[in-house]
Amino acid sequence: METEAPKIYEMEDYDPKAAGSVNQTEIHISETEEGDIMRAKVLDSVNHRKLNARQIQLSSIAGAIGAALFVAIGSGVTAGPVALLIGFIFWATVVYSVAQCQLEIVSLFPLDGSFIRLAGRMVDPALGTMVGYNHFFAQTSFVIFEATVINTLVSYWGYSESPAILISVSLLLYLAINVYRADLFGEAEFWLALGKVLLAIGLILYTFITMVGGNPLKDRFGFRYWKDPGPWAGDSPSTRLESFINAVNTAGFCMGGPEYISMIAGEASDPRKTVPRAFKTITARLVVFFIGGALCVGILVPYNDPTLVTGDGTYAGGSPYVISMNRLKIPLLPSIVTAALLTCIVSGGNAYTFNASRSLHALALDGKAPAALRRLNKKGVPYLAVIVVMLLSCLAYLALGSTSAKVLNWILNFCTAATMLNWCVMAFTYVRFYSAMKAQDIDRKEFLPVYSKLQPFAGYWALFWACLFIWLQGYSVFLKGNWNVATFIFNYGIIALAGAIGLFFKIYQRTPYHRNKDVDLYSDLDFFDALDQHYQQEKDDLPPATVKDKIMAKLF
């Protein structure tokens, strides 16, 4: 009896120590062997995907909501309450549009380091390299920011010991949570993010109670500060425009979300179900936490408050909420808010460590960083990438040789520009993805596991405004009397650095710019379909049994 000759397949080399590598080779396998290899890849991916739906939802909130929403937002209040509110509403439309772009493409390809690797796949490998290093530098800078800012936070209580102590404690804590297993990171973020949500809701309630007279002074101030000193800072059209740009810049630093969901997609269990749900919660998050927060701080503090303008020498003391509590002579509450901000810092540093290490890991998977950084431990964590991030984060000790306020301002400027560059690339990647589907005669609604709203207009909207404000965000350094070399470098240096890295790889590796009809829209789809079937089979075999499990399944 004759046996069927083995078929020849083009498929990825399977390497469980470097899941996601893309070295192609021609090998002879039978259909049975092909199925065995696919099952092995699925099981290895399941071992790597430790973040459940509950952890993903709260981790996406943790990455989006940081201490900036409660403290750094104060720099935007100086624009005036109405200018700040309009600036946040406007920028929320940009973030929403970026989220709509990522919803489609990341749900289809929930890869490790999704938006980084998809930029290289949909546009040009050099673009993926550029945005990968941009995100890596930005997230590592955020880790440094969180490790440094904790000293200025506790100085509210008179702490004056060496900054090196708390920096060391912070970095060791981030390392311990991130280096071993992803579900430990996810569980820590779940509870820390829950604390952030409660803090944000509590401060919204605080605003309402105090504005109607629930304060020691019995002052029903309502919207008083919208009338005196006024709704919009500035006494001429040009100064009012500067106020609005300042408000948008503040929103650009405070708001986040889409990039964090994209980065955790590669370690999400049942990604084609959990990732879209996380993206779809962004609208409520933008309205309640960010726009609601902008409204609250504009009600609580006048834009010409001396402490808001000059600061009081502590990080927490610059929070509009703490300033309002001191203005209203409310005892104890400022200390409680300051203590709550500590959880924001720990959560933020934890999330940024995760994102920085996964950015580096994604670059390694595509051959744009040392191959050793592909390595995973037995729990599926790229531990060497985590260690590299921690070593670079030791730059936080620069705070020992300079004032913390100066270091923090440098980092804030650097990260605002880097975040806007990320959004430019994410929007452009989607525009090319949409054009490729159209050029290849693919029915978008049949091809995609989930499709988003307002496309392709949302993609173009996000692309235009992100590209514009990446240049406007540092405009103030060019105003008369404001020139400062360090400020200029930290406002625009990341654009030059990331661009130079991308250009180097473009020239050195001669990377191709993919034409729409040549964009690869099919590789890995069979794997993600098989992964989806695996998780569906798990649900069918082990449905929620207890009341608690059923409630959690409904909620998340």
Image (cartoon, helix red, strand yellow):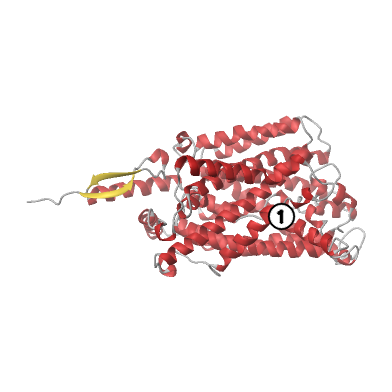
Of residue 1 and residue 503, the one placed in the foreground of this image is: 503
Expressed as whole percent of the image width and height from the top left, the position of residue 275 reads 51, 57
Residue 282 visible in the snapshot: no
- Image height check: is 148 above or below 531? above
Quadrant in which residue 138 is drawn: top right
Give the amino acid type for the residue marked by disc 1 in the picture: Leu
Of residue 257 and residue 343, the one placed in the foreground of this image is: 257
Expressed as whole percent of the image width and height from the top left, the position of residue 51 reads 51, 49
Give the residue number, with chain letter if any, for mark 1.
472
Expressed as whole percent of the image width and height from the top left, the position of residue 13 reads 34, 43
Quadrant of the rendering where the C terminus is positioned: bottom right
Q: Residues within 10 Å of mark 1 (few under 14, many from 20)?
A: some
Q: How many marks overall? A: 1
In the rendered image, the residue lying farthest to the left is 1
Quadrant in which residue 501 is drawn: top right
- Image height check: is 296 above or below 471? below
Residue 412 visible in the snapshot: yes
| Element marked by disc 1 | helix
Expressed as whole percent of the image width and height from the top left, the position of residue 424 reads 59, 55
Q: Is residue 85 left or right of residue 136?
A: right
Q: Measuring 88% from the left and 65% from the top, which residue is drawn there?
A: 230
Q: Is residue 517 left or right of residue 82?
A: left
Q: Is residue 445 left or right of residue 297?
A: left
Of residue 115 and residue 485, the one placed in the foreground of this image is: 485
